[in-house]
Image: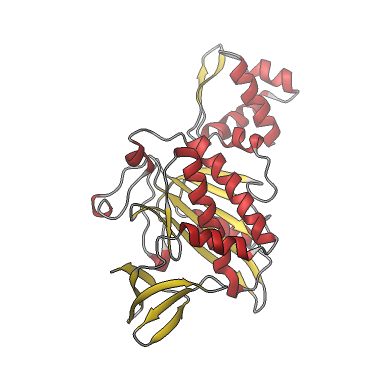
Amino acid sequence: MEKRRNDILQLLKQNKVISGETIANSLHISRTAVWKHIQILQKKGYKIQSIRQKGYQLQRLPDLPINEIQQQLKTTYIGKPIISFPDLPSTNDYLKHLAKKDHPEGTIVIAERQTMGRGRRQRSWSSPKGGLWFSLLLRPPFPPQKAMIVTMAVSIAITKAIHATTGIPLQIKWPNDILYKEKKICGVLTELSAEMDQITFMIIGIGINVNNPLPLDLQPTATSLRQICSKKIPYTDLFLSLISFLDEWYGYVKQQDETIIRETWLSLSDTIGKNVKITDGSSIIPGVARGITEQGGLILETTEGTKQIVTGDISYL
């Protein structure tokens, strides 16, 4: 079915206007089938005009032409398949539903807009049109205690992909925020299902402020790529770069090469060496971030000795 739609797209691109009958005859399908494929392409963001007594005209590609992106992929793990929507309540929730039905590792669900996007601890996440909002299904060869290693690899990939596309130098704030000059540009939400000794699946939600406007209350602490670069960022180039780097760094996860992940993460860290405050429920622990554990926890030097922090919100002092 996807191949048929790709064939129809090629015909639309090759002709200023092409009739449904010509498409049907070229692909040996019915005109009804052509019409149904056209409707699906329109829902995916392709602006296709039906011109009376003449046929169909492709007027505009979507910001993220998923069909074309899918054809360009040369990845081992990531992006097979990519499922796109104009709107979803939450890409994480949708992909979690697919994961429970044994959808393949590497599946991506992306939406132009989320109406119920969320970050850590169920905080709402502003997800208007203009940003990159997608989720990734992974099945790493790790017990749940090592889930943070996967999140670290993902954060590295995002940082490197954005830098490769825009030239912007970014840093990572433990556990999973991507920063530009201490302003948040990307968040990563990890959710997992696991047995005692094995992760069943992980859903990695990624939200990047690209060309989207930011609410007034977020502007003191967040920024967007467009704001930094003073120009609109091409989605397709950025998304392809993200998939490529995610594939590379997830390869290290699959090979269980944790050393390169930890060392690279430390080289990109904005947290290590800083005075911080960890808040976890009613518990508040101040200290100096000294490093990370083998499993990705934060090593915190406090007045009461060294502590290993597995979870919590971090603030700089």
Task: Tell me: 4 left or right of 301.
Answer: right
Q: Nearer the viewer, residue 108 or 301?
A: 301
Numbered label tally: 0
Which part of the image, by quadrant, shows the N terminus?
top right
Q: Nearer the viewer, residue 292 or 210?
A: 292
- As displayed, is residue 33 above or below residue 192? above
Which part of the image, by quadrant, shows the C terminus?
bottom left
- As displayed, is residue 63 above or below residue 178? above
On the image, the x and y values in percent for residue 89 come to 45, 53
Residue extending furthest toward the right: 28
Question: Which picture quadrant has residue 282?
Answer: bottom left
Q: Which residue is painted at 29% across and 55% down in the image? A: 221
Q: Nearer the viewer, residue 313 or 138?
A: 313
Asked whether residue 107 appears in the rendered view, the answer is no
On the image, the x and y values in percent for residue 30 come to 70, 25
Q: Which residue is painted at 37% across and 45% down in the image? A: 128
Residue extending furthest toward the bottom: 304
Asked whether residue 179 appears in the rendered view, the answer is yes
Task: Tell me: 75 left or right of 217.
Answer: right
On the image, the x and y values in percent for residue 316 come to 31, 67
Question: Which picture quadrant has residue 129?
Answer: top left
Task: Tell me: 181 left or right of 40.
Answer: left
Q: Which residue is painted at 62% across and 31% down in the image? A: 37
Looking at the picture, the colour scheme in use is secondary structure
On the image, the x and y values in percent for residue 146 come to 59, 71
- As displayed, is residue 15 above or below residue 251? above
